[in-house]
Image (spheres, rainbow, N blue to C red):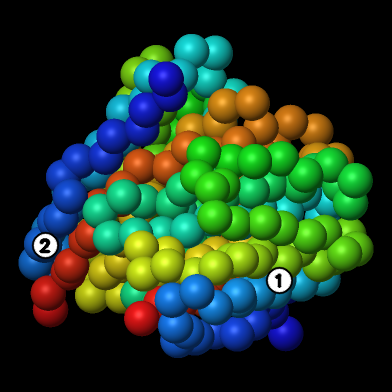
Amino acid sequence: EDQVTQSPEALRLQEGESSSLNCSYTVSGLRGLFWYRQDPGKGPEFLFTLYSAGEEKEKERLKATLTKKESFLHITAPKPEDSATYLCADINDYKLSFGAGTTVTVRA
Amino acid sequence: DADVTQTPRNRITKTGKRIMLECSQTKGHDRMYWYRQDPGLGLRLIYYSFDVKDINKGEISDGYSVSRQAQAKFSLSLESAIPNQTALYFCATSDSRTGGSYEQYFGPGTRLTVT
């Protein structure tokens, strides 16, 4: 059974303190690994799709990377506005399977 | 204007009542999805529809039904609401014509409370 596991569950950072979030997946023949950002009370907002091991994508202070078993979301020099829950998902039979998310809090 | 809209945004209802959540989209996407989100459990798929005539159960469809009235509209019904259906409900869309990309785009959500 496809499983997506995210760690840590919560991450508290000081502004400017870089860190990484982990997403591990078990699906074989990965068709895509997705990262979303979710603010409280809002729907998830699409960030990135990664398709193959070694691929990297960047957006402002966020960089996503992919290996054969896991993906990392690196947050470089975060700001308070980067506080959110970050969700990852893989795709199996055209359906996304989501992890439980990592809640990031960045203090000024 | 939002591409994916959901109504109502908040709803409180009593056990045993029938309730419908509605989703409309202006993205022109052919695929639509309903998820529920519970703290610590992430998003779980309830139903999905690849076109108006193609509706499929997700991993947690018991107690729910759906209707795809048009390409742009997908409704979720709780026939007889129970307290453990209290959750955040999200509608999402995707486009099968994007050559292998499967990104889904989410609405703002409906917060449902069953008392």
Quadrant holding the C terminus of chain A: bottom left
Q: Position of residue B17 (x, y in %)?
A: 54, 78
- Amino acid type of the residue tagged 2 in the rendering: Leu
Q: Residue at x 69, y 47 (%)?
A: B48
In front of the other: label 2 or label 1? Answer: 1
- Labels 2 and 1 positioned on one and the same chain: no
Front one among A38 and A52: A38
Q: Is residue B42 above or below residue A16?
A: above
User: Within 10 angstroms of label 2, few (less than 14), some, or many (20 or more) residues?
Assistant: some
Q: Secondary structure at mark 1?
A: strand
Q: Secondary structure at mark 2?
A: strand
For disc 1, the marked residue is B23
Residue A1: image quadrant is: top left
Q: Is residue B111 above or below residue A104?
A: below
Mark number, residue A49: none
Residue A49: image quadrant is: top right
Q: Position of residue A50 (x, y in %)?
A: 52, 33
For disc 2, the marked residue is A13
Total labels drawn: 2
Give the distance between the C-alpha atoms of the residues marked 2 and 1, in whole angstroms: 36 Å
Q: Position of residue A71 (x, y in %)?
A: 35, 31
Q: Residue at x 43, y 52 (%)?
A: B43
In the image, taking residue A107 as reference, residue A67 lies left or right, namely right
In the image, taking residue B103 as reference, residue B84 lies left or right, namely left
Q: Is residue A95 above or below residue A38?
A: above
